[in-house]
Image: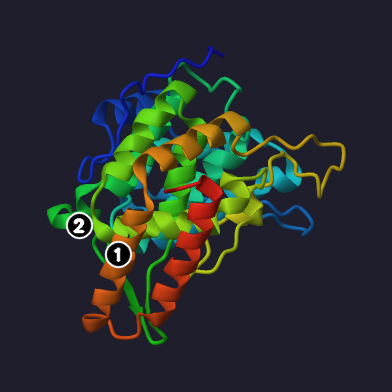
Amino acid sequence: MFDRKSKTKGFSWMPGSGPDVDAVLRLTRQFRAPNQPMGEAWFMGTKRRMFNELMTNPPDHWTPDLLRQPLYELASGPGCFGYLPEWTSWTHFLLAQLPTRIDGSSWTSIYECLVSAFMAHYPDEHVAGPYEGFYSDVLATVGRVPMSAGSWPGGRLSEKGVISSIEETPNGPFISCGGAFSAALFLHLKYLGQADIGGWLSSVFAIRHYIWRIKLVLWMEAASPVLTGSGQPSDLEFESSDGSGWEASWCLKGNSPCKDVDPTQIEIPFIDEKRREIFRGAVKASMSVADLDALNAYLGALDVRYPGMDQICGQFRRAARVIVKDYGLA
């Protein structure tokens, strides 16, 4: 085990950048394919399901349908049963293999589950990783998946990207602030070195795409139990139209196993007070009431292109009022 040393100084989010090739290579060198299959996180039955298909199919043939259930098991297992070597080995291997495979909206839930699996196995960011620079490599690969070129054609969010723009449904349009968007933001807030958070947040707020900035406002309000309090991802509402949760985030309760299983467990803060303080400072430095008014006006004008924006507009105005109060914006 090595002491954690951040290699993300100056780390920033740039639309179209995608996973760092050198970090991918380091992860793949460190984490080879496990020798044994992983099993489900359920031990009450007489026969435990083993995911042999992950071993019989090479990684470049894996599909979202093949990966979805194993990733759910990796995310939920530690909270119910603690750590098993097979789950840790497969989590590491998938962290190495999937960042370059995840592309487009059909992979969104896989991305979210991968983030949840990583967080479930490393609930305490102060604990050293399996090798020096591990956390930095995860951030430079998994963390940059939403910035891949496929999600940002022409520098704008795609409707079919890992993070979507405006989604049209039978019930009308909506702008999601949860899912991969929320998972990626919290991944950085929790695991970036504290000295690097401010620079990364500056890059997040510097993305001028209107829908991106609207998502940020909606997210800050919906994720307030964690951003302004001591909540855990399991406290976040998982509702695609206005929640800030993501796939399997309900499994993340700050312990392994969680206090529901072992009441003697001490809950690990998801985002510590120092990080929340840095976030508050970044919001005040990057956002103003005038910015919120401009975004509100943009939303109102979108009704011509996307009829039925009333619900989103009301949701945004409510979020803006909360943010002005919570962060003291002027």
Foreground residue, 313 or 269? 313
Judge whether 245 appears above or below 299 on screen. Answer: above
The answer to whether marks 2 and 1 mark residues whose Cβ atoms lie closer than 8 Å is yes
Residue annotated with mark 2: 156
- Indicate the amino acid at tag 1: Ser
Residue 124, position as x, y percentages in the image? 62, 30
Question: At which x and y percent is residue 57?
Answer: 39, 50
Q: Is residue 267 visible?
A: yes
Residue 247 located left or right of residue 309: right
What residue is shown at x 46% (from left), y 71% (from top)? 315
- Please say if 124 is above or below 67: above
Q: Quadrant of the N terminus?
A: top right
**Residue at position x 30%, y 38% from top?**
203
Q: Is residue 289 above or below residue 315?
A: above
Which residue is drawn at the image coordinates 37% and 49% (left, top)? Answer: 288
Which of 54/90 is in front? 90
* Residue designated by label 1: 165
- The quadrant where residue 317 appears: bottom left
Q: Amino acid at mark 2?
A: Arg
Residue 55, visible in the rendered structure: no
Residue 72 percent location from the top left of the image: 57, 54
